[in-house]
Image: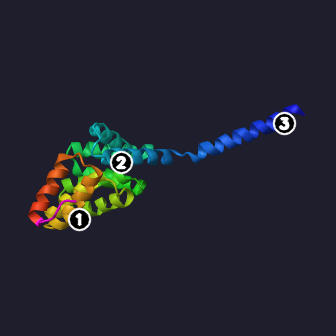
Amino acid sequence: MTMRILTRSYNRVVTAAMAVCLSLSPVTAAADTLDDLFARLSDPGTRNWQTVERDLEIQLSLSGSASADLLLRRGEAAMEEQDIEAAIDHLTALTDHAPDFAEGWNARAAAYLMAGLHGPAMEDLRQVLVLEPRHYGALAGLGALLEDQGRPEAALAAFREALAIHPHRPELQSAVARLQRSTGGTSL
């Protein structure tokens, strides 16, 4: 009789523990980490912003899928080798395989830019921002594309958003200052 009671109690404890563990999914833990990293990065007083930036970029590059990670690495390697066609092929396979993985779209946008395909790059950057609106790299890329298209006001808005997320990047600061001068815009 006592053994049955102990077994039932043990089963309840194990079941409760499993429910807690299952509710703490890696996605939730990663989201908490991203939120923390973005908060630290956006603080102008953060002294170790390069470390925070690196940790954030590592977190953003984790897809949660070994095959997606492999496709991202292959696409990035192809870009480094200047094999843009192969890069676009790998990264298109990645965006097809993992359409909710923002970094796949961001990498393909970079490949499209290397190929001079500004329209597809713009669409991929927009998709990145749908999936991760705080992606300062995508915002900066969007700003650069808009500036190249002769749309300085829209470019300034994109660079300002990127700067609000990452106030430490000198190139974002100079882009905002340059576009403010050329458009007569005021600082935030």
Magenta stretch: dominant secondary structure = loop
Q: Quadrant of the N terminus?
A: top right
Which mark is nearer the camera, 2 or 1?
Answer: 2
Q: Residues within 10 Å of mark 1 (few under 14, many from 20)?
A: few
- Determine which residue is flagged by label 1: 119
Q: Amino acid at mark 2?
A: Phe
Residue 184 colored magenta?
yes
Asked whether residue 93 is in view, the answer is no
- Determine which residue is flagged by label 2: 38
Instruction: Using the image, tell me which numbered label, if any, was put on residue 8.
Output: none
Mark 3 / mark 1, whichever is N-terminal: 3
Q: Residues within 10 Å of mark 3 (few under 14, many from 20)?
A: few
- Relative image position of residue 127 (x, y in whole percent): 34, 61
- Relative image position of residue 145 (x, y in whole percent): 19, 61
- Secondary structure, mark 3, is helix
**Quarter residue 143 falls in:** bottom left
Residue sitting at 45 percent across and 48 percent down? 31
Q: Are marks 2 and 1 in contact (CB under 8 Å)?
A: no
Q: Amino acid at mark 1?
A: Gly
Which mark is nearer the camera, 3 or 1?
Answer: 3
Please state the extent of the stretch shown in magenta in the rendering. 183-188
* Alpha-carbon span between mark 2 and mark 1: 29 Å
- Determine which residue is flagged by label 3: 5
Residue sitting at 32 percent across and 44 percent down? 74
Residue sitting at 65 percent across and 42 percent down? 18
